[in-house]
Amino acid sequence: MSSLGAMGVKRVTAPEGVRATALLTAYARAQETARPDRLFDDPWARLFIAEATAFTGAGLPRIGMARDDKVSPLWAAFSSYFTLRTPFYDEHILRAVAAGARQVVLVAASMDTRPYRLALPPDTTVFELDNASVLDFKDAVLSRHHARASCRRVPIGVDLRADWSGDLLAAGFRPGEPVVWVAEGLLMYLTTGDSERLLAAVTAQSRGRAWLLTEYPERVVDEATMTSRATDEAERVSAMMMANLVRRGPDTEPAPWVARHGWTAEVTDIAAETRRHGRPVPDVFDHGAPDRVGVWLLSATR
């Protein structure tokens, strides 16, 4: 995935490895946190944006398609997607923890702050897997602002394309105990082969009761679908960048995909989740759109 520099945005001081997709997600979470009817509260999201871009003003700086000054069709779609998937993951993590899971593994943790914003039991351990520079940046911001986690948090710098299971085990992960695997915003950037290897690795380390939470689009999101919703050149460039990052991901629908590895899935989609929370569904996710891109959200158990 590209860094922010690939988007042609000025005044970016994000360290190498802090990816554009990570900051776009944080941007959406910061905007949601500012709403009086917010679905969740993530006060650290705005701090990530401010420190990554050296921004000192009010509100949020513009970052490619992400904007705080007006609503555009492109950012409305992406921000809705980033925002509305968040409570889906939050709710399922809390349910699994209530059912006895005391290990949570965030695969591609990025700017996720769930150990800080969710009231997880203190005996829970959250393992965060991601590029070391991403985790270092996040840790530095959280430390400077005296953030306190509700539970034990273990960041693990890894190459997610390589075999990270040894690093996870060395950090204290216990494969025989209940675990929640969270792969948020990841599979759409993986090839089919990489998706299979990820699920196989997760399955191999799930020898006790396990939950898997993830999402991926029903089809590859093409460049035309994204750029047709851009309203200026900055959005168009940002849309092209995102389109170039997207890969096929799993080669079939969620239930049969995870069933091949012994999991049972419950599946919804981003449009249903958006309606569940009383928010308008962007046209690109709606069933009536000719260029619709549905996004499955799944919770699987084994």
Image (cartoon, rainbow, N blue to C red):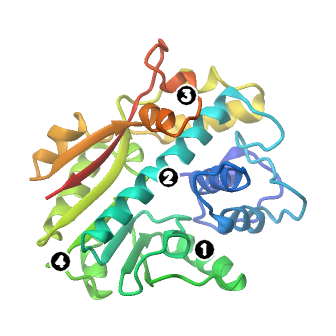
The residue type indicated by label 4 comes to: Pro
Q: Nearer the viewer, mark 4 or mark 3?
A: 3
- Quick one: quadrant of the C terminus? bottom left
Q: Nearer the viewer, mark 4 or mark 2?
A: 2
Q: Give the camera-side residue of 165 and 82.
A: 82
* Numbered label attached to residue 175: 4
User: 236 left or right of 166?
Assistant: right
Q: Position of residue 195 (x, y in %)?
A: 27, 49
Distance between mark 3 and mark 2 Cα atoms = 15 Å
The reply to whether residue 107 is visible in this rendering is: yes
Name the residue beneath numbered marker 3. 281
10 Å neighbourhood of mark 1: few (<14), some, or many (≥20)?
many
10 Å neighbourhood of mark 3: few (<14), some, or many (≥20)?
some
Distance between mark 4 and mark 2 Cα atoms = 26 Å
* Numbered label attached to residue 138: 1
Distance between mark 2 and mark 1 Cα atoms = 18 Å
Q: Secondary structure at mark 1?
A: helix
Q: How many marks?
A: 4
